Amino acid sequence: MHALTIRLQDEMFALEATHVREILDPVPITRVPNAGDFVGGLINVRGSVVPLADLRVSFGMDRPPPDADTRIVVMEIDLDGEPLVAGILADKVYDVTDITAASIEDAPRVGMRWPAEFVRGIGRRDDDFVIIPDMNRIIRAEGDRSSSLAANERTDR
């Protein structure tokens, strides 16, 4: 797997490099009223409106303010056969590397602090562990959560 390695908090994650369109410095974010924390805003990427997702929300991580290392990884994710372009916040972007299939293992069911269903596998890069997120599951789950919250808000009125 060709992977772009990024840091979220103190953990290294690997995103499939074939899905990465570009890496941006932080840009102005248009907040969406009543949007959830996962996709709380939109960004302008070359004239296109792109949702900005924060994987730290899905993984229950702290969300410090952006700093000099913060980047936005613009990805194209295949969601149920439809391409979805989304920006992913990264605390730091490292490099593109190869992670061999032999070094990727299933996420352990115990001892992890992240939701196991959001982890496609754990890879090795040199002596470090690299978390490989399941972007389809994360986007689908967070979208379902946002839809049900919006429906509950409408029925509460």
Image (tube, rainbow, N blue to C red):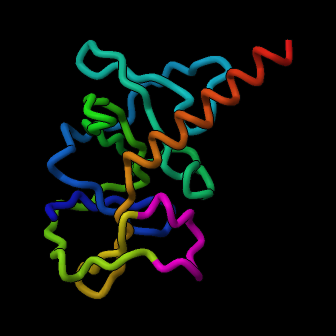
Q: Position of residue 134 (x, y in %)?
A: 38, 55
Horizontal side of residue 70 vs 93, given as left or right: right
Task: Give the magenta part as a residue range.
Answer: 108-119
- Name the foreground residue: 120 vs 44: 120
Q: Quadrant of the N terminus?
A: bottom left
**Residue occupying the point 38% across, 76% down:** 106
Image spot of residue 113 (x, y percent): 59, 71
**Residue depicted at 38% across the width and 35% down the height:** 26
Q: Is residue 89 above or below residue 69?
A: above
Task: Give residue 147's quadrant in the image.
Answer: top right
Q: Is residue 62 left or right of residue 51?
A: right
Q: Give the image location of residue 145, x and y in percent.
A: 62, 37
Give the quadrant of residue 19: top left
Q: Is residue 7 above or below residue 90?
A: below
Query: What's the magenta bit mostly, secondary-structure-wise?
Result: loop
The mark total stands at 0
Q: Nearer the viewer, residue 91 or 157?
A: 157
Furthest residue toward right: 157
> Looking at the image, which residue is at 14% across and 69% down?
98
The x and y percentages for residue 77 are: 28, 39
- Residue situated furthest front in the rendering: 80
Q: Quadrant of the C terminus?
A: top right
- Up the image or down, 19 lies above or below 87; here it is below
Residue 115 lies in the magenta stretch: yes
In the image, residue 84 lies in the stretch drawn in magenta: no
Residue 115, picture quadrant: bottom right
- Vertical placement of 121 versus 55: above or below? below
For the point 28% across and 22% down, the residue is: 45
